[in-house]
Image: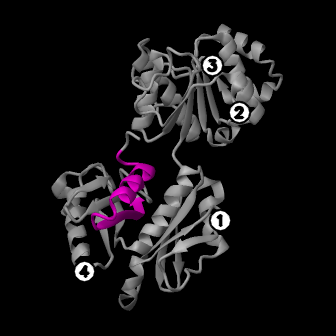
Amino acid sequence: MLNNHSHFALLAHYLKSNEKLNWVLATIVNKEGSSYRSPGAIMLVNDLGQSYGLVSGGCLEANIVLHAKKVFESQQANYVEYDMREEDGYAAELGVGCKGKIGVLLQFLTPKHQVILANVYQRMHDGQASYLAHTYLTEPSEKHLLSDLSAYNDKGKLIATTSQQQLNLTDDAFSGVTTNERTHWVCSLAKTSCSITKISAPINLWVFGGGSDAAPLVSMAAQMGWRVTIVDHRSSYARSSSFKHAENILKVHPKDFVQFELFSQIDAAVLMTHNLNLDAAWLTLLHEKNVGQFIGLLGPLERRGNVENLSNITDENWLSQRVNGPVGLDIGGDLPESIALSILAQCHSVLHNRNGAPLSGKFINS
């Protein structure tokens, strides 16, 4: 996976090298106001001083590495606050543009932490979400609790914990996270404050059609930390040399496809075989299995009608809610890279429940 900042990529790197090095995990556990990264963002630092991931836009990482050195020495967790609202503070010295405050918890990772993170990584690989719980504020006498890490499934059931006494999270704590698809919640338990963060599986994108125009789409998606599968049965298509960043390449015709258990993890699909019958056949299978929040169909509106007619899908509601064709946002350009950017921008906005409008609220060229 061509990504350096996603939970999936960071945990994969840690689990591959944890036996050779000691590690500190830095996690944003709360924030107030504006910040570059949100609660749940992580950064890993090893005892060689190497760091992976970001908890800011790059302005705080060097200071976090310094704090990590102290954690290595004591092997005790430490909670650090960065208040970018202070006019004469650390943020002003760096010229940080965000005017908010974030709290970062640094934990020395032990074999018990490794078990938890391996569990979370496996769940992400299987397309499942998890929740990580950190205690970040306690009484001075209870500071050892800052080292605790607990993982829960999406129903609030404990998966694994480093704590000798199970953290008693109430149903209300988890409903606070899951209601309205919230990804973070802070709750108070006695004299402690606890951060609960949802860790989602990486987006699973399937690209049907392994022509040369699909290569930038796959590369860009992998750069964002998405897991990409290419499907194309044709001998001169979907060559591994052209799709080095694809996680899977399936050489199979739609009529011979039987690995439907793999379909269950599809979040998005793009149909770009440049063949009406193949696109229609794959669309039919996607409809039968009712997968993919986003299905992109390459080509003009007339071609979309032809593909839908050939698919014999009569569920107009499904077609209107899932199929996006012509796929992409109107950003101009006709090169494969521009088309890939256009497709992924629309797909990203749909999967994150956004409208794709400019953040400024206006179009510069209007």
Measured in 3D between alpha carbons, the distance from the residue under mark 1 to the one under mark 4, in whole angstroms, is: 36 Å
Q: Which residue is drawn at 48% across and 30% down?
A: 345
**Sequence-earlier tag: 1 or 4:** 4
- Tell me how far mark 3 sits from mark 2, CA to CA: 27 Å
What is the three-letter code of the residue carrying label 3?
Gly
Left or right of 111, for residue 69: left
Q: In this view, does 338 lie to the left or right of 276?
A: left
Label 3 to label 1, Cα distance in Å?
37 Å
Residue bearing mark 2: 258
Labels 4, 3: front one: 4
Q: Mark 1 points at which residue?
A: 175
Which residue position holds label 3? 325
Up-down relation of residue 80 to residue 210 (above or below): below
Dot 4 or dot 2, earlier in sequence = 4
Q: Which numbered mark, 3 or 1, is in the foreground of this view?
A: 3
Give residue 289's position: percent from left, percent from top.
75, 35
Q: In this orientation, does residue 363 appear? A: no
Mark 4 residue element: helix
The answer to which of marks 4 and 3 sits earlier in the sequence is 4
Q: Do the residues labelled 4 and 2 touch (CB within 8 Å)?
A: no
Q: Would you say 96 lies left or right of 315 here? A: left
Q: In which quarter of the image is residue 177?
A: bottom right
The mark nearer the N terminus, 3 or 1, is 1
